[in-house]
Amino acid sequence: MPFGLKSAAQTFQRLMDSVLQEIDSAFVYLDDILIASPTEKEHMDDLKAVFRRLIDHGLVIRLEKCLFGVSSLEFLGHQISKKGSSPTQAKVKVIQTFPQPSTVKGLQEFLGMINFYHRFLPNIAATLSPLYGALKSSKPRQELVWSQEMKQAFLNGKTALANAAMLVHPCTDCPLALTSDASDVAVGAVLEQFNKVSLGIDYIAMARAQAASIDVQAYKTAFTCLEITNTRLNEQGPELVCDVSRGRPRPIIPPDFRRTVFDVVHNLSHPGVKATVKMVSEKFVWHGMRKQVSRWVKECHHCQSSKIQNHTKAPLEHFSVPEKRFSHINIDIVGPLPFSSGFTYLLTIIDRNTRWPEAIPLRGITTPECVHALITGWIARFGVPGDISSDRGSQFTSSLWTEIAARLGVKLHHTSAYHPQANGMIERFHRTLKTALKARLTGPNWVEELPWVLLGLRTTPKEDLGYSSAELVYGEPLTIPGELVPPKSAKSMDDLLLNFRLNIPLYAPLPASHHTSARTYLSPSLLAAKHVYVRRDGTKGPLQRPYSGPYAVLTPGEKTFLIDIGGRTERISVDRIKPAFFDPFQPVILAKPPPRGRPPAKQSHPSRSHPSASSTASKHQQAMSRPAVQTSSRTGRTIRPPMRYQ
Ligand SMILES: [Zn+2]
């Protein structure tokens, strides 16, 4: 393969790789060979192995271009030593003295040079973004107009290089952590490793702090089960006051270093209290560690917003069973369901006294449609109820609904947001209705099956009552298909009415049983909390944190809390909140409220913010929280994102 051809470099690299690939300590880039070994003896062996391979393949090296047995050298623009690698001083100097370029091409050169060292420079893309901005849609020879922002970015880039971090060599048996971040202008990720011994803690400074700490010195004379000696954690490390009772040295941590030690151990994977205490106590010692570490874990914002703890269960609201039939009804909407004979929703109604269920198919769920269904499907049969309970679906909170209720003399009750359990009776009805529909359905036409399902539900005796809701309404059971019609018509109408009037009070209504009565749990710390986290409901991304917050509590309560969410007061059920814990010595940082509202409506369909109706509202919210989509590339090309991002 003659030199000078386009693919010469690749071919030569392939050759060198094949020659030296079995020697782990040799690194090759074209004609540069770097041999790094842990000890002098191993280095001699490695050198011999490399020479042997070169001889075998007929390759020759020029002695005057070689460096042997050094502890630090320059390799491909990097200063490599046993500690790690960093940009070479000569190259850094060239960039430091680079004059402010006057053309786009000059700027490209400068950015290229800096980018050669980009992995040593944290957040460099964000730092340089004003300069990248200037490259957009500009011709190479074009004169640059330097804004103040660009000048600052130019200087900041140079400063960043001067302060470039040294990257340590990777360690094969240390844990890896991938840390990533993104902003409007840049994305970044860094693969981090924590050395088993140093764990990112400055032990030299710690040794000094130990000497100055009365706390640590007291350990030397105190009567404990610890064995205190001065020892080194590794060959080069400083001498530290350690406990060696467990076989391996555990440094006694002076007060100023305790938080750092905790952070280093806990922040890797945010384990719980028990695991963190165990991990810290395996490696370190200090008085009161268990208590302090437990508190810090409890106060960790990342843990609090990510981990689901014992969900608070609000005691269910006990509506006493109304004495009069049809005086208090629950109302709700089911859907969207599969399209059937033009219908996609159901308005469901249940009487709290007799538990008579009604389900009226709806084409749409606007307030007028719901009002019409209520009047024809319920009020026309059972009269005007005194009270109507519903959730906070937009139909049931609209001014039209409220107005009509006021005219009819109906009192409206709303359950708190996202706490459908308080509407328990109708939720249970939905469950049985859906199960029955599913069980009966052979095709998509649920509208045809609905009357039969309702008949079944009305004639099934309630377990706790012993009567069906049909009996409570009509005074006798209804006849179901296939049943022989009983000879009841023999009685005169007067007798029947008398019997009915006498018997109805005997069907004493019982309080509805709370089948869903989960263990109520209200932690004392929640009642005393000044700040809380709020559980997000609706669909969550697979890695989205389940809680948002912390938010300030305005008024606590037994079932609901008034909470200040970014200046907006919201009443939220205690089921969805948990107390927030903070470091009392740090200022409290409150969360920004989640984005709200819906994107510009395309559908004519009024969507509801109803939990069981659909999850569209939360999907809209997610869509809203997505960052704005870029419409042109860096080179000025127009980007057309796929439909789902628009
Ligand atoms: Zn944590």
Image (tube, grey):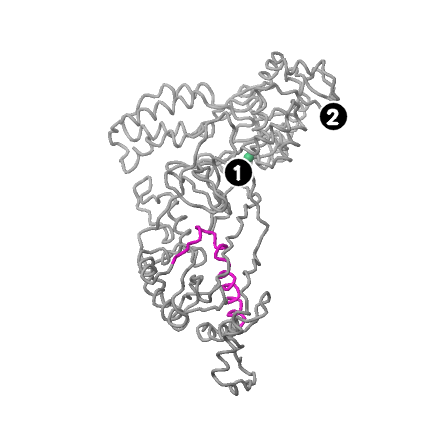
Q: Residue at x 49, y 45 (%)?
A: 535
Q: Is residue 314 above or below residue 234?
A: below
Residue 378 in view (yes/no):
yes
Residue 82 in view (yes/no):
no
The image quadrant that residue 273 belongs to is top right
* Ligand 1 within 8 Å, label 1 CB: yes
Looking at the image, the residue that sits furthest to the top is: 212
Mark sitting on residue 246 = 2
* Residue 169 % position (x, y): 57, 27
**Range of the magenta residues?**
411-439
Q: Nearer the viewer, residue 364 or 103?
A: 364
* Residue 89 % position (x, y): 46, 18
* Residue 224 % position (x, y): 74, 20
Q: Is residue 234 magenta?
A: no
Q: Residue at x 55, y 63 (%)?
A: 510
Instruction: Give the residue pinned by disc 1.
Output: 304
Point out the quarter of the image occupied by ligand 1: top right
The earlier-in-sequence mark between 2 and 1 is 2
> Looking at numbered disc 2 in the image, what kind of residue is underneath it?
Arg
Q: Nearer the viewer, residue 202 or 314?
A: 314
Q: Residue at x 36, y 63 (%)?
A: 365
Mark sitting on residue 204 = none
